[in-house]
C-alpha cells in the first residue's frame, strides 16, 4: 500500500507507522510531501480539522500534477479546542482513498488549562516554554506537548496515531456497517412518515 503523507515531519510519519502497526498492516510505504495547511501555525477549534483537510487536498493536487499514484493520502493537523469552560489538545487526520473519498478521524482529547489555551490563543508557543523548562529544543518534534503533560505516556506520535486509526476504521467500514445503519435509519424514517400520515385519517 502506497501512502502519501502531507508533511515531512518525522513524528507524523511515525504516527502513521504506529497506527498501521496497531491495525496489523505491515505492507506499506510512505512518501512524505511538504504542503501548506492554509490555517494558523497553532490552529484553534475548527481550524484544526480544516488544516488536515486542506493539507490533504494539496497533496491530492500535487499527486495529480506530478502523475504520482497512491492508495491513500494522509494528512494530520494538531491544534487546540475549547468546549464551554474546558480546553483540550486535539489532532485531526484526513484520509483520502484513491477514489477520492475523504474520511476524518479525531484523536483522544487531552485536557489543558485555560491559561495554556489563552497563551496559544494570544499567539504564543507552549512548546517553547516547555523546551525552556526541559532545556531541550526538540520537544515539538519528539515528545510534544501531550508527551510533556503526560510524563511521556502520550508522546506526540502516539497521540496523533489515534486520529489516523479513527479515520482508517471509518474508511474501512463505511460500505459495511455505516451504510447498513444508514439504510436502517432511512427505512425507519419512511415508516415514521407513513405512520404520521395514517394518523391524519384516524
Image (cartoon, rainbow, N blue to C red):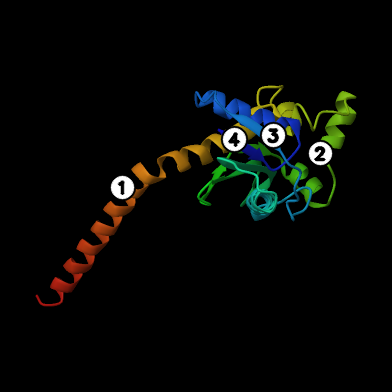
Q: Residues within 10 Å of mark 2 (few under 14, many from 20)?
A: some
Q: Position of residue 173 (x, y in %)?
A: 40, 40
Using the image, tell me which numbered label, if any, was put on residue 2.
4
Q: Is residue 115 above or below residue 159?
A: below
The answer to the question of whether label 3 and label 1 lie on touching residues, with beta carbons closer than 8 A, is no
Q: Secondary structure at mark 3?
A: helix
Specify whether residue 39 is in view: yes
Extreme residue in the front direction:
67
> What separation in Å lies between label 1 and label 4 (alpha carbons)?
29 Å
The answer to the question of whether label 4 and label 3 lie on touching residues, with beta carbons closer than 8 A, is no
Lower sequence index among marks 1 and 2: 2
4 vs 3, front mark = 4
2 vs 3, front mark = 3
Q: Position of residue 114 (x, y in %)?
A: 72, 45
Specify whether residue 146 is in view: no
Q: Position of residue 54 (x, y in %)?
A: 67, 54
Using the image, tell me which numbered label, if any, was put on residue 126.
2
Q: Secondary structure at mark 1?
A: helix
Amino acid at each position: 500500500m502506497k501512502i502519501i503523507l502531507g508533511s515531512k515531519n518525522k513524528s507524523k510519519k511515525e504516527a502513521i507507522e504506529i497506527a498501521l502497526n496497531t491495525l496489523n498492516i505491515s505492507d506499506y510505504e510512505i512518501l512524505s510531501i511538504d504542503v501548506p495547511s492554509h490555517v494558523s501555525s497553532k490552529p484553534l477549534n475548527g481550524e484544526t480539522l480544516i488544516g488536515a483537510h486542506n493539507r490533504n487536498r494539496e497533496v491530492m493536487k500535487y499527486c495529480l500534477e506530478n502523475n504520482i499514484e497512491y492508495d491513500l493520502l494522509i494528512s494530520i493537523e494538531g491544534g487546540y479546542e475549547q468546549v464551554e469552560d474546558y480546553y483540550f489538545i486535539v489532532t485531526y487526520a484526513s484520509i483520502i482513498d484513491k477514489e477520492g473519498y475523504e474520511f476524518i478521524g479525531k484523536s483522544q482529547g487531552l485536557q489543558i488549562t485555560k491559561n495554556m489555551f489563552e497563551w496559544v490563543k494570544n499567539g504564543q508557543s507552549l512548546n517553547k516554554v516547555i523546551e525552556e523548562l526541559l532545556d531541550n529544543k526538540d520537544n515539538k518534534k519528539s515528545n510534544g506537548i501531550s508527551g510533556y503533560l503526560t510524563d511521556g505516556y502520550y508522546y506526540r506520535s502516539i497521540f496523533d496515531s489515534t486520529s489516523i486509526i479513527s479515520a482508517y476504521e471509518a474508511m474501512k467500514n463505511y460500505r459495511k456497517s455505516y451504510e447498513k445503519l444508514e439504510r436502517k435509519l432511512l427505512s425507519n424514517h419512511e415508516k415514521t412518515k407513513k405512520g404520521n400520515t395514517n394518523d391524519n385519517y384516524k
